[in-house]
Amino acid sequence: MTAPWIAHQTQSLLAQRGHAWLLQGPSGLGQYELALALASAWLCEQPSAHGACGQCPSCHAIAVRTHADLAVLMPETQMLELGWPLSEKAQTDIDDKKRKPSKEIRVEAMRDLVEFAQRTDARGRGKAVLVFPAERMNAVTANALLKTLEEPPGDVRFVLATEASHQLLPTIRSRCQTHTMVWPQAEQAMDWLAGQGVQAPVAEALLRSAGGRPENVLRQNSAGLTPAWWAALPKAMLQGGASHLSDLSPAQAIDALQKLCHDLVLRASGAEPRFFMGSQLPTTTASLATLTDWFKRLMQSARTAEHPFNAGLMLEALANDAQQALLSRV
Ligand SMILES: [Zn+2]
């Protein structure tokens, strides 16, 4: 089921002309879903103003990830997560443990794209290129894409989706029409989450901890970060409870602690907390300066969180640091 705010944006983008779209906005608002809806509509054999029909051979080919006229450029980790097949060579290398799936969009993928752009479409509806997250291109791949964007063979359309448009080459941004993702209404988000099996009280609490981004709710929910877990996090950290973090990856733990710290900073400045209920936040003697320092340390940790020396030790260090900050009296 397409979320209503995505359906609405698909319709509005299809009503405009454009051969290259850049969808930008914070994560969790559905950039990828919108990009795919747009590309599917471009390639659909019976599209309507609402988008792709979902029934034709082209829509079916996209659903099973085998459309010859759709090129998907993503980091391999992302492709695996979203169920897109890797090239045979890449899959073999990874299966043989020659290397790990890449977290960037690879130069080889970009070379394939150049070939793709030059060949004739297979189904007579033109071709589409989907890039997500576009900020995962390095200088080489970004420049290669730029060349294709600058001189597109007539029948190729592009949709780039990004969660960090400031990291893109300005020349790429200027070649695209920009669309800023629309933030869903809380009620819309709740309805949609109910349709995905996350019921009202849980959805409400999770939506709060996800900063109002419904996609992130689904991710949190499937990662076992239940509302009860969130509610108990502040007090667990006050007691130095590293075990509360034990099911999380270091990156998830840092994200959760940043939200806690963020809310404590808000409260210390007299504002309403955003991710937690006021009653869930612990009484702390920590000063604004201490909290700010803690936040900076969390940001530093985030940089090494993808390759921690030892995930268990890192979680323990994070919990210790949180407790010290919360108990500090300076
Ligand atoms: Zn169709």
Image (spheres, rainbow, N blue to C red):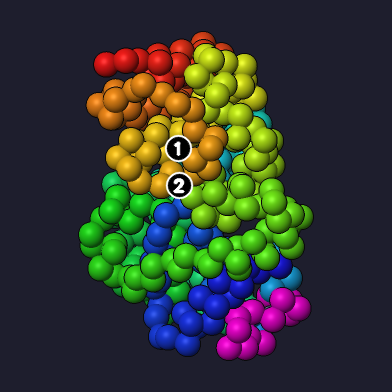
Identify which amino acid the numbered label 2 is placed on.
Answer: Arg
113, 84: nearer the viewer? 84
Q: Position of residue 251 (x, y in %)?
A: 49, 30
Residue drawn at 41 percent across, 20 percent down:
326
Asked if the magenta segment contains residue 47, the reply would be yes
Q: Which is the main secondary structure of the residues drawn in magenta?
A: loop
Which stretch appears magenta? 46-58
Q: Position of residue 169 (x, y in %)?
A: 26, 55
Q: Which mark is residue 109?
A: none
Q: Which residue is mark 1?
A: 259
Q: Position of residue 79 (x, y in %)?
A: 58, 48
Residue drawn at 54 percent across, 49 percent down:
208
The N terminus sits in image quarter: bottom right
Please say whether residue 301 is visible from this viewpoint: no
**Relative height, residue 294 to residue 1 (above, below):** above
Q: Which mark is residue 274?
A: 2
129, 118: nearer the viewer? 129
Residue drawn at 67 percent across, 43 percent down:
221
Secondary structure beneath label 2: loop
Please say whether residue 157 is visible from this viewpoint: yes
Label 1 environment density (alpha carbons within 10 Å; few <14, some 14–19, many ≥20)? many
